[in-house]
Image (cartoon, rainbow, N blue to C red):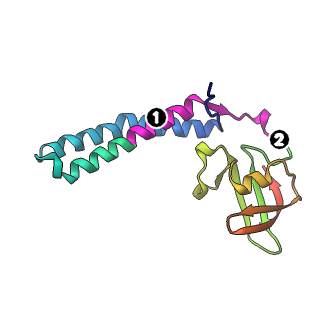
Amino acid sequence: MSTEKVFPMTLAGKEKLEQELENLKTVKRKEVVERIKIARSFGDLSENSEYDSAKEEQAFVEGRITTLENMIRNAKIITEDEMGTDTVSLGRSVTFVELPQGDEETYTIVGSAEADPFEGKISNDSPIAKSLMGKREGDEVTVQTPGGEMRVRITSIK
C-alpha cells in the first residue's frame, strides 16, 4: 500500500496555494477553454499551432490543479508549538554569514510546496536547510552545495 507524501507548510503557504488553485479553476481554466474555442474556429486542427498551444496550456493547467489539490489535501500545517524556539526548524527565519567574511543572508525554511528563493523562502529539502536544521545561533556549519562546500555561521534565528 502506498502512502501519500505529506507536505509540511506554514498556514500562509497553504493559503497561497489555495489562492493559486482558485485562480486556476475560476480564471485560467476559462481562458484556456476560450483559446481552444477560438483556435478551433480557424479550421483544420492538424496544422493549427494555436490549437496545439492552447491544448498544451490546458494540459499544464489541469496538471497544476491536480498537483495543488494533492498538496493541499496532504498539507501538514507547522504551528508555532512545533517550531524549535532556539534551533533552526521549519517555519523559522535563519540569518547566517558565509565564512571567512561573506555576505549576510536570511532565509525562511519552509516546506517544498511553498519554497520561493526569490522571496527568501527555501525548501527544507534544500542542501542549505538540511545542513542548518537543528543548529543554534552561533553554530558554524559546513553546507554541501552543488558548487562545493560552504562554511557559514548562524547569526540569528527568528
Residue 36 position within the rendered picture, expressed as x and y whole percent measured from the top left: 22, 42
Task: Please tell me which residue is depicted at 87% across the width and 52% down the height of the picture.
Answer: 136
Closer to the N terminus: mark 2 or mark 1?
1
Q: Is residue 36 left or right of residue 130?
A: left
Along the line of sight, which residue is nearer the eye, 104 or 55? 55
Q: Which residues are magenta?
A: 61-84
Residue 84 numbered tag: 2
Q: Label 1: which residue?
A: 66
94 horizontally vs 34: left or right = right
Q: Which mark is residue 24?
A: none
Q: Give the answer, above or below, for where 104 lies relative to 47.
A: below
In the depicted structure, whether residue 72 falls above or below residue 60? above
Q: Marks 2 and 1, how far apart in space?
A: 33 Å
Up/down of 25 relative to 57, above or below: above
Q: Main secondary structure of the magenta part?
A: helix
Q: Residue at x 75, y 62 (%)?
A: 144
The picture places residue 158, in percent across and down from the top left corner, at: 78, 49
**Point 68% across, 69% down: residue:** 147
Find residue 25 and report its horizontal and vertical position in percent: 38, 34
In the current view of this chain or complex, which residue is farthest to the top?
A: 1
